[in-house]
């Protein structure tokens, strides 16, 4: 078994600063809370606000140096203790072991051949740290009174994790001691490393993540030191910003949604052992067995003895991986950048365009995605752009013309252009839009590639620059594709090629091909009902879009956030993303929105 450790809290001695009076610390905390709870800064002032908040946090961190809870011994020393505990609890541990995979960090290694779709790992509920276990712990009395804990499961898990880490008799210590001591999420980036993300689509989420985490920390610091129901929490003498940042990152990189014991709803959970698996492209192979009350995972493919066992985290972009997981995935088949588009309400044809889009199940203003694959646009975006670029006559044809209702189904189908002129116009628009977005970056792709060749580049800087470069490469491909398509359809027009005509019999074709499903029947994954930005064809602002939350996969009929890799839905209770519940958060007035570490 691993080396038996004891929990320790340093208040003085090597590495610790002079004692800070409670009053002095509370004043700093109040100042931080006030700064983080102020009205959202005006556009362009977010970085300035970040620097101010960061300066306050660094002042607090300096005074808290040496006060955090830590374990004696290295993370690796406790893996055998984790495996023994898992076996004792009834988890499966007979076909893998925890191993170090260099750049990927720790992961699971097969110790025998494993067949594709073989059930190789299961973890019983009693091993999981959940919102329910938090309510039944020392945190329960505070949970019953605090609206933030009640509304934000991720925050509850983070505080629960800290309480159990500080408890020498916690049943979860074998798991907690194997969690990383720190992470590579942007919460751990130095200021100059965050600067590499300026002008990227990720920057707003990164800044919001930091601000929200700082605000939550300040709020709970006050609660822990003043609320009567927090008097028995083991955190009064050891609740530093570094502690909370660690807990937030632990949850952010590992949180999952599982069914409650009765299957009536979902709850958030940390799943020991299973969360050691690293990511690769593929399909989701994890589910929850309510009958046996355990999380189960089948093999993604055949694994030979000594090979690393991977799982698929979900269809996340690299921006999402960097922000929520702390790594950049080189071979990401699902990488994409967001693009905000909308029909201006002041446009003369707004009502007609909005009606055609509504019939197709598409909002008049939304966030779409440009993908790394070919073609770079989805059926939904193609449909939107076709309507966006329609003339009044074309709109009327799709509203009241012959077979108007059925023709709506063809909007996202590449085989049925509205007109050659419409195709030329939409691809010209896409080419121009992507080119404008490229101009917002302060460096070129060539400059980024040169920077990545520097041997002294920090890991976090490397991650940030790779993300920045990946965004540009997707936009560059969109420009290239838009140009090629524009020229192709111009040639079709010039040569007088007949336009493919829609026939009612073609509806069978649309319904039998997944890529060509009627738009009205397809789920609009890129819809963001909160987007209010409106643009006209003539007035397009080249600001980069913020990240929109992707839909989470289903676990045993329930919603599941795989390894923290499936982003929380809009308005969800993410640890560092603004949620609807934060409207009730006394630690905030109004701010903007925001949990696997590549090194397991």
Image (tube, rainbow, N blue to C red):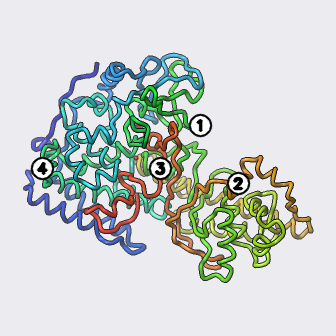
Element class at badge 4 = loop
- Sequence-first disc among 1 and 3: 1
Element class at badge 3 = loop
For the residue pair 448 and 283, the one nearer the viewer reads as: 283
Quadrant placement of the N terminus: top left
Q: CA distance from mark 4 to mark 3?
A: 39 Å
- Sequence-first disc among 4 and 1: 4
In the image, which is nearer the foreground, mark 4 or mark 1? 1
- Sequence-first disc among 2 and 1: 1
Q: At which x and y percent is residue 189?
A: 36, 52
For the residue pair 255 and 194, the one nearer the viewer reads as: 255
Disc marking residue 567 = 3
Residue that appears at 50% across and 23% down: 120
Q: Is residue 180 left or right of residue 14?
A: right
Q: CA distance from mark 2 to mark 4?
A: 57 Å
Q: Is residue 161 left or right of residue 101?
A: left
Residue position for label 4: 17
Residue that appears at 42% across and 73% down: 44
Residue that appears at 56% across and 53% down: 470
Quadrant placement of the C terminus: top left
Residue position for label 2: 375
- Sequence-first disc among 3 and 2: 2
Q: Is residue 296 above or below residue 476?
A: above
Residue that appears at 30% across and 39% down: 181
Disc marking residue 274 = none
Q: CA distance from mark 2 to mark 1?
A: 20 Å
Residue position for label 1: 282
For the residue pair 452 and 172, the one nearer the viewer reads as: 172
For the residue pair 266 and 426, the one nearer the viewer reads as: 266
């Amino acid at each position: 078994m691993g080396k038996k450790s004891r929990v320790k809290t340093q208040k003085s001695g090597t590495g610790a600063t002079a004692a800070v009076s409670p009053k002095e610390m509370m004043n700093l905390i109040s100042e931080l809370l006030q700064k983080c709870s102020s009205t959202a800064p005006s556009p362009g002032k977010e970085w300035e606000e970040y620097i101010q908040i960061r300066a306050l946090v660094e002042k607090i961190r300096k005074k808290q140096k040496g006060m955090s809870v830590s374990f004696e011994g290295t993370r690796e020393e406790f893996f055998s203790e984790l495996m023994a505990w898992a076996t004792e609890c009834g988890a499966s541990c007979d076909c893998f072991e925890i191993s170090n995979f260099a750049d990927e960090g720790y992961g699971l290694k097969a110790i025998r051949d494993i067949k594709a779709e073989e059930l190789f790992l299961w973890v019983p509920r009693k091993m999981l740290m959940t919102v329910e276990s938090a309510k039944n712990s020392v945190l329960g009395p505070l949970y019953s009174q605090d609206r933030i804990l009640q509304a934000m499961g991720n925050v509850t898990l983070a505080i629960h994790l800290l309480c159990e880490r500080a408890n020498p008799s916690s049943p979860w210590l074998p798991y907690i001691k194997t969690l990383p001591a720190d992470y590579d999420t942007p919460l751990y980036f130095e200021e100059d490393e965050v600067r590499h993300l300026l002008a990227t689509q990720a920057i707003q989420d990164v800044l919001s993540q930091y601000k929200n985490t700082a605000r939550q920390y300040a709020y709970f610091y006050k609660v822990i030191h003043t609320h009567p129901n927090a008097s028995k929490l083991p955190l009064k003498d050891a609740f530093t910003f570094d502690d909370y940042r660690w807990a937030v990152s632990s949850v952010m990189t590992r949180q999952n949604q599982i069914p409650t014991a009765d299957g009536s709803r979902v709850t958030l959970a940390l799943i020991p052992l299973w969360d050691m698996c690293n990511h690769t492209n593929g399909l989701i192979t994890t589910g929850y067995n309510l009958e046996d009350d355990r999380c189960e995972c089948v093999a993604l493919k055949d694994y030979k003895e000594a090979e690393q066992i991977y799982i698929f985290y979900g269809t996340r972009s690299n921006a999402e991986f960097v922000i929520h997981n702390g790594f950049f995935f080189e071979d990401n088949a699902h990488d994409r950048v967001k693009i905000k588009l909308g029909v201006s309400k002041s446009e003369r044809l707004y009502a007609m365009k909005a009606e055609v889009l509504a019939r197709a199940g598409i909002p008049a203003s939304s966030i779409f995605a440009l993908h790394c694959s070919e073609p770079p646009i989805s059926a939904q975006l193609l449909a939107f752009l076709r309507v966006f670029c329609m003339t009044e006559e074309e709109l009327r044809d799709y509203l009241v013309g012959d077979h108007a209702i059925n023709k709506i189904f063809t909007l996202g189908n590449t085989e049925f252009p509205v007109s050659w002129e419409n195709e030329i116009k939409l691809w010209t628009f896409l080419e121009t839009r992507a080119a404008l977005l490229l101009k917002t970056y302060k460096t070129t792709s060539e400059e980024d590639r040169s920077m990545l060749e520097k041997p002294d580049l920090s890991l976090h800087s490397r991650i940030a620059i790779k993300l920045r470069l990946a965004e540009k490469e997707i936009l560059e491909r969109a420009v290239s594709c838009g140009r090629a398509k524009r020229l192709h359809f111009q040639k079709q027009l010039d040569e007088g090629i007949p336009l493919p005509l829609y026939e009612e019999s073609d509806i069978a074709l649309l319904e039998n091909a997944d890529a060509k499903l009627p738009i009205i029947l397809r789920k609009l994954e890129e819809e963001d009902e909160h987007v209010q930005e409106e643009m006209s064809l003539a007035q397009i602002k080249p600001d980069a879009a913020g990240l929109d939350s992707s839909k989470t996969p289903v676990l045993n009929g329930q919603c599941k956030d795989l390894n923290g890799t499936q982003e929380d839905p809009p308005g969800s209770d993410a640890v560092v993303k603004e949620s609807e519940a934060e409207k009730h958060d006394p630690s905030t007035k109004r701010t903007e929105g925001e949990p696997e570490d590549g090194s397991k």
